[in-house]
Image: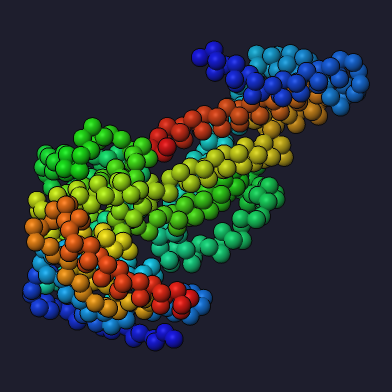
Amino acid sequence: MATRIETQPVATGAAGSAPGIVIDDVMHEYRPPRGRPVLALDHLQLEVKEREFIAILGPSGCGKSTLLYLMGGFMPIQHGRIIVNGKQVTGPGPDRGIVFQHFALFPWKTVRDNVLYGLEKQRLPKAERLEICARFIDLVGLRGFEDSYPSQLSGGMKQRVAIARTLAIDPDTLLMDEPFGALDAQTRSLMQEELIAIWNRSPKTVVFVTHDVREAVLLADRVAVMTARPGRLKEIVDTRFPGGLDPDIVRTKEFIERVDYTWNLVREEAVRAEREK
Amino acid sequence: MTNKIVITLWRYTPLLLLAAAWEAVTQAHLVSQYALPTLSGVFSSLWTLAGDDLSYHTSRSVARGAIGLGAAVVFGTTAGVLMAWYRPVRLLLKPFIQMFYPMPKSALIPLTIMWIGLGDPSKITLIFIGSLLPIVVSSFNAARGVDQVLIWSARGMGATERELLLEVVVPAALPEILNGYRVALALCFILVVAGELIIANNGIGFLINFLGEGGDYKGMFAGVITISLVWFLADRGYVMLMRRILIWRE
């Protein structure tokens, strides 16, 4: 039973100048050429503070990636509005950097040229571009691989390139769509630690979509748990631990309890999603 | 290096066996020499022709093919990519593609002769039309199939529409586009010879026809072998070029 969404005219002008992200009454419906429309997001309301690391967690198909793509400006917003740092989202822009699950590197470009691409679009002088590029390749530990093509790299290395490429253009907001979902367990855990280290050095507003509960609780300040389709906000779990983002917190009792609590929230929704299939 | 030569020889063993069988069967007079001349005779004829005007006819054929194919590459790729990227272009061109694609292009020979005349322009037009369609279709499919997230990430980094097309869509589609050129290369040779067989006063197709009508079957076979060899070398050369261009693939 999908309700039809009326396309709403987009209000122009600044709508609140508070930094951070405001997701206001967003709905999204997929309309396949054949078959009935599917409501992916339903009256979604969420606020993300500036420099907050928020994880969006939910069963598969709950519309969490859709929400991220809407924030990225890649799909038209059918209903409601999204405001990022005081500006209403109407299209993609370099103020919001995105990292995809399957890396989305340009396979015909070397590591260096992949990282340089965004910098060229920013029309920076050449010397500056090269300097920034080298710095971020260093940051993700890929010095020596500048001239390699993505096909010559492992999954973890590819995702490092993608992260370097996104960080290099210095976006205020980082949108991450299950960025470690395609990696093996060891690489994933390593990358989580590195992301924490990078974020500690230069905190940005991060929206991190995942279906991995432990990852969400470990990385995020808050975890927004979504309901099964159509996606709504179920509950926000505070997952900030004293002592900041220390990788050792995973052994503390609070951490384990918080993971369990969040797990139960997601499980309820996953069970519901299964039943409705 | 020697190892590589040995492997190559092994790979073409079936061809060598065929050649040996051909020679044996014809030497033993198991088939009439009018149906099939001896292979050694064909090669000696090839040698004679090579000293005469074989290279002239070959170069005429290659020139026709190159001009027709070159034009098809330029127009076909542009049309295919633009069709994939802009809906109005797609709506305008798609019916023509659907109509012309299944049509045997050699059926157009009398028409091109009637409209454009007997000379090179009509043959080149035919080659152009014939090679154009596989190029348009492969370029269109390739450009349509470009991964959405590549386009999104370029757009997110601030690429304009034009930059997206030239810096993302075209390179991402390149492997499939280049495969389309290879198909067109094969079709182009077929149409070169077909056009020359029907009416021409030079080119390999003309030579084959001319020698055949004069009863020189060895020479005729030598012509067939020449055009096959030229196509084979062109194809091999193209595959090598393609590998160099697509060096970034694993």
Using residue A252 as the reference point, say whether residue A113 is left or right of it.
Answer: right
Residue A265 visible somewhere in the drawing: yes
Q: Quadrant of the N terminus of chain A?
A: bottom left
Q: In the picture, residue B68 is in which quadrant? A: top right
Q: Residue at x 69, y 33 (%)?
A: B205
Q: Is residue A14 above or below residue B51?
A: below
Q: Which residue lies at the image location 35% right of the left edge and 48% below the top edge?
A: A184
Question: Is A276 on the left or on the right of B41, as rendered?
Answer: left
Say which of B247 and B229 sits in front: B247
Vertical relation: B81 (above or below) A207: above
- Say which quarter of the image contains residue A20: bottom left
Residue B248: give x, y in percent of width and height.
Answer: 38, 37
Across and down, in percent, residue A214 comes to 27, 60
Q: Residue furthest front?
A: A253
Please tell me whether residue B92 is drawn above or below residue B121 in the rendered image: below
**Residue in view at x 29 percent, y 55 percent:** A179
- In the image shown, does B74 or A168 lie closer to the viewer? A168
Point out residue A55 in the picture as x, y percentages from the top left corner: 23, 65
